[in-house]
Amino acid sequence: MTTNRRTALVTGGSRGIGKAICERLAADGINVAIGYNRDTETAEKLALELREMGVEAAALQGSVENLYEVKKVFKQVNELFGGLDILINNAGITADKTLIKMERETWMRVIQINLFGTYHCCREALPGMLAQGYGRIINVSSIIGLTGNIGQSNYAASKAGVIGFTKSLALEVATKGITANVVAPGFIATEMTKKIPPKIYRKIEESIPMKRFGRPEEIARLVGFLASDKSDYITGQVYGINGGLYM
Ligand code: NAP
């Protein structure tokens, strides 16, 4: 399956923001490995859709919190695509509770997937990127990593961690042709925000200066730019994309 096109791995690529990123990258002529955890049918359907757009695509199962599974995914990427140029760490979850009610398990699950997952994938991607002298790493954080939020101390800690992690990584690889940046979305209409009770949803909408939730494609356009050769001189940056909610 190897071609001269660049190859991207998008974790959590099967739906929501990740799916929009996969579609954006494919539209830009980039081969896409779709990382997912549970929903094989949805991921395979997307892989078919991307292949119909003219690029190579594969759905690869593995939980990002598990280093063994991440290694398996990277092995498959190398076998199928011959290497990796672009890594989008998008897989993420929420498990909301105020701190007084938050057991260690709930804390750990979010940190394991959102922060350890990002570390695992970057760690596995780096040797190949260093060897080829080229790489684009885009880590998806959140507005909550910048502002904090009631009931989201685990999520906020994981997403703030992603920011500090990415800046450190950007410094370490700055002379190696590899850039590392963060995208920090505000409230975006996906399965994740469908969990918000309607009354609170409307309140959030009202508080956003643009008076609406963002669309996954709007995040994908920014990621597409950062993943391209046009973003050569940009590294260690945090891009808010939130309808004006946080400036
Ligand atoms: P989503 O619709 O819930 O999709 C989450 C994706 O992550 C799915 O593809 C899911 O795959 C995958 N995933 C979950 N756990 C995983 C694991 N352990 N290993 C590998 N993949 C896993 O979420 P979304 O709203 O698109 O969010 C995407 C990213 O944007 C997340 O990092 C989120 O924190 C961030 N974000 C979202 C918003 C928002 O308002 N939606 C705002 C700011 C930041 P399976 O279904 O196969 O498990």
Image: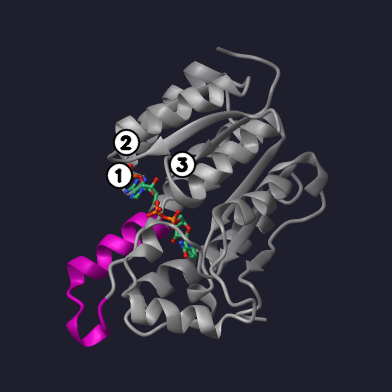
Q: Tag 1, which secondary structure?
A: loop
- Disc 3: which residue: 13
Amino acid type, callout 2: Glu
| Structural crowding at the residue carrying mark 3, measured as other residues with C-alpha within 10 Å and reported as few (<14), some (14–19) or many (≥20) | many
Q: Residue at x 68, y 54 (%)?
A: 222
Q: Residue at x 51, y 78 (%)?
A: 205
What numbered label is drawn on residue 66? Answer: 1
Instruction: Please state the horizontal and vertical placement of residue 202, each as a whole percent of the image.
Output: 43, 79
- Range of the magenta residues? 97-116
Answer yes or no: do the residues labelled 3 and 1 have beta carbons within 8 Å?
no
Amino acid type, callout 1: Asn
- Disc 2: which residue: 69
Instruction: Find out if the beta carbon at label 3 lies less than 8 Å from the nearest ligand 1 atom.
Output: yes
Instruction: Find out if the beta carbon at label 1 lies less than 8 Å from the nearest ligand 1 atom.
Output: yes
Q: Eyeballing the image, is 165 above or below 5?
A: below
Q: Residue at x 57, y 64 (%)?
A: 214
Residue nearer the viewer, 22 or 33: 22
Instruction: Please state the horizontal and vertical placement of residue 114, each as a whole percent of the image.
Output: 40, 58
- The quadrant the N terminus occupies is top right
Image side of residue 104 versus residue 230, left or right: left
What numbered label is drawn on residue 4? Answer: none
Answer yes or no: do the residues labelled 2 and 1 have beta carbons within 8 Å?
yes
Q: Is most of the magenta stretch helix, strand or loop?
A: helix
Which marked residue is nearer to the observer: mark 2 or mark 3?
3
